[in-house]
Image (cartoon, helix red, strand yellow):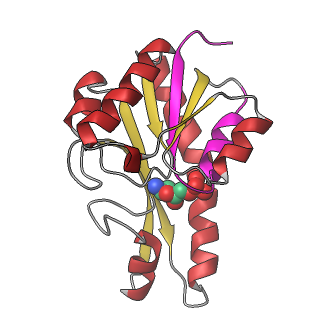
Amino acid sequence: MSNVRAAVFASGTGSNFQAIMETESLACEVALLVCDKPQAIVLERAKTYNVPTFICDPKQFASKAEYEQVIVERLQEAEISWIFLAGYMRIAGPTLLQAYEGKIVNIHPSLLPEFPGIDAIGQAFKAGAKRTGVTVHFIDEGIDTGPIIAQETVTIQEKDTETSLKEKIQKVEHELYPRVINQLLQSK
Ligand code: GRF
């Protein structure tokens, strides 16, 4: 097993977390799942893979800085060197960004800079776009901004519904994210 220790941050279902965990020859060990929602389904998935979880509810903290400081301490304790956001529904603040500069990667279901923010798939569908896609990028303090690492296009056909589009995008995500993670780690 690789000695690079990574954390996945997720707030929801965790299908990308699962895809990462199912990857053969992953170039890192997923040594921690950080989750901001105590009821999130991804926590069940983490149990299945014996990945330790850190549930940190921002409501328990007076500020984003305090919330992120606690997370950073937990990450350092676990000797985490990379963070992969997979459906983590929060904007990172300076505390996290400075502690892990250049080491935080996100996946977003659109061809950024098109359709940033929430419900990117719905946004593309409702806009009548002919194509959308998936972006893997480093994060900065913006909403789905930051240097792009990889993108893959998904065609929206006449017969597509929002549901079928979501399925197509997820299929691409589940293949693209682990591949990009491995490329990133192997090039370091
Ligand atoms: C994915 O579409 C990802 O691109 C976005 O949030 C969604 C998370 O899905 N950032 P899941 O929880 O991995 O199923």
Classify 89 as above or below 161: above
Residue occupying the far right of the picture: 48
The residue shown at (36%, 33%) is 104
Can residue 144 be seen by looking at this rendering? yes
Classify 118 as above or below 138: below
> What segment is highlighted magenta in the picture?
1-24
Q: Whole-percent x and y of residue 5?
A: 53, 17
Q: Is residue 39 left or right of residue 87?
A: right
The residue shown at (42%, 15%) is 76
Query: Residue 104: within the magenta?
Result: no
Q: Whole-percent x and y of residue 103?
A: 35, 26
Residue occupying the far top of the picture: 3
Q: Quadrant of the N terminus?
A: top right
Q: Quadrant of residue 131?
A: bottom left
The residue shown at (39%, 20%) is 73
Classify 51 as above or below 150: above
Classify 12 as above or below 19: below
